[in-house]
């Protein structure tokens, strides 16, 4: 029996070694599984206390545009008239008033970075025609405010100073749809800017089916194009079918056209569930379909870029599936997404527009019955859940 002890000790050592190796292998497998479940990407938390309440018993209608100025002041544009029809909310607007609350705020509302109300203005005035259905708000490098309109008679663009003084009207209202016209527009969804070239990119839009590029100083049309760089065609298209061959024209609405720092333009072909990417001369580069089985309103509503110089990440608002995607801008791979349908902070009802400030925070607006502006605070790059994150609720404990 004593002669067996060394063999027993050796067997024990082998058993321990094998157990250790098995444990290490299991740990490695867990780490690899965790790596597959997470991704390095920007992290956000909803700020449930931003913005602060409006004065004057004001409330918002459908909020259909958001922009940020050079001081990180946030501008929104909304449709107060969509609120007036709800008599339980707007008793002050009745004639005579039937209650002490509430009334629609003016169409354009400005907030400071802390969420405090700064001023509100907009609506019909002398020298211009306010859109019948205002849509989109953009802030240029001089902090001027540009808006479009997607009403049946809205074939023009308006430009105002930072505090609401009328500066220019480009295009003539009440013109017929014509995606190849050089003098007016067709129910503009959104305007963005290439400051270096002093060009405005117009998602033109709800009537026309094109991207139009304007001189920022004169409003003169310089060039335009349709899907894949094709000449736009206004022929009626059948409803979107995710199993059909890809459409060679944009569907209405063409909802955004965002120029990047490296000379590309990212276009929201909303009902076709796709981002199309172009060079700035309209040459087609590539495309990516997002949630391609989405019908109706479509999945690609608006785009904003991360604030690093390379604009490494692209943020995409999807108002039908009620989420914000975080994509790698170069590959257009979806890394993660946050949000869900609902009324609580961090949830959405038709998330419509998206913008970023200089610190990387995201601002979103909601149309239809959403009627809301939300802030998602940038928390740096880190490991986040790949795919659906759910609601990005603050992690700090309650006090």
Image: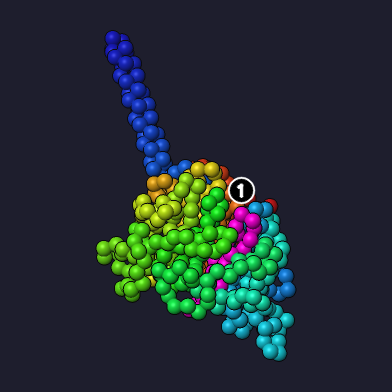
The reply, left or right, for residue 10 in relation to residue 148 is: left
Assess disc 1: are there few (<14), some (14-19) or many (≥20) residues with their C-alpha within 10 Å of its C-alpha: few
The mark total stands at 1
Q: Residue at x 56, y 72 (%)?
A: 134
For disc 1, the marked residue is 359
Quadrant housing the N terminus: top left
**Which region of the structure is painted magenta?**
134-154
The reply, left or right, for residue 275 in relation to residue 242 is: right
- 247 vs 179, nearest the viewer: 179
Residue 277 screen position, x and y as percent: 40, 54
Magenta-colored stretch includes residue 138: yes
- 160 vs 19, nearest the viewer: 160
Residue 374 screen position, x and y as percent: 59, 61
- 398 vs 337, nearest the viewer: 337
Magenta-colored stretch includes residue 235: no
Residue with the most extreme bottom position: 96
Is residue 369 visible in the rendered image? The answer is no
Establish if 234 lies above or below 334. below
Residue 222 screen position, x and y as percent: 47, 60
Mark 1, secondary structure of its residue = loop
Q: Residue at x 44, y 44 (%)?
A: 39
Question: Where on the picture, by quarter, is residue 63?
Answer: bottom right
Residue 90 screen position, x and y as percent: 65, 81
């Amino acid at each position: 029996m004593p002669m067996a002890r060394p063999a027993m000790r050796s067997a024990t050592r082998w058993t321990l070694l094998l157990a250790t190796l098995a444990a290490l292998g299991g740990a490695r497998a867990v780490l690899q599984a965790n790596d597959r479940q997470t991704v390095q990407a920007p992290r956000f938390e909803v700020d449930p206390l931003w913005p602060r309440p409006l004065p004057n018993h004001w409330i918002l209608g459908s909020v259909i545009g958001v922009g940020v100025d050079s001081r990180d002041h946030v501008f929104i544009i909304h449709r107060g008239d969509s609120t007036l029809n709800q008599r339980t909310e707007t008793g002050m607007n009745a004639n005579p008033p039937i209650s002490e609350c509430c009334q629609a705020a003016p169409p354009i509302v400005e907030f400071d970075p802390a969420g405090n109300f700064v001023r509100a203005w907009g609506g019909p005035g002398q020298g211009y025609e306010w859109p019948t259905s205002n849509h989109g708000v953009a802030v240029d490098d001089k902090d001027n405010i540009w808006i479009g309109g997607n009403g049946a008679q809205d074939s023009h663009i308006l430009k105002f100073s930072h505090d609401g003084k009328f500066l220019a009207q480009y295009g003539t209202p009440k013109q017929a749809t014509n995606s190849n016209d050089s003098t007016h527009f067709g129910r503009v969804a959104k305007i963005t800017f290439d400051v270096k070239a002093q060009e405005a990119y117009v998602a033109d839009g709800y009537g026309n089916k094109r991207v139009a590029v304007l001189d920022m100083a004169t409003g003169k049309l310089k060039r335009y194009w349709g899907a894949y760089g094709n000449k736009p065609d206004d022929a009626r298209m059948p409803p979107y079918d995710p199993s059909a061959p890809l459409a060679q024209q944009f569907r209405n609405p063409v909802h955004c056209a965002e120029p990047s720092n490296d000379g590309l333009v990212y276009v929201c072909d909303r009902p076709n569930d796709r981002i199309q990417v172009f060079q700035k001369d309209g040459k087609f580069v590539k495309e990516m379909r997002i949630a391609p089985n989405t019908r109706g309103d479509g999945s690609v509503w608006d785009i904003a870029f991360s604030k690093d110089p390379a604009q490494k990440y692209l943020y995409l608002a999807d108002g039908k599936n009620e989420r914000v995607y975080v994509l790698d801008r170069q590959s257009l791979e979806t890394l993660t997404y946050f949000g869900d349908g609902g009324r609580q902070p961090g949830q959405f009802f038709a998330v419509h527009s998206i913008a970023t400030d200089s610190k990387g925070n995201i601002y979103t607006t909601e149309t239809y019955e959403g009627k809301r502006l939300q802030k998602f605070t940038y928390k740096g790059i880190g490991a986040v859940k790949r795919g659906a994150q759910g609601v990005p609720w603050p992690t700090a404990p309650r006090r």
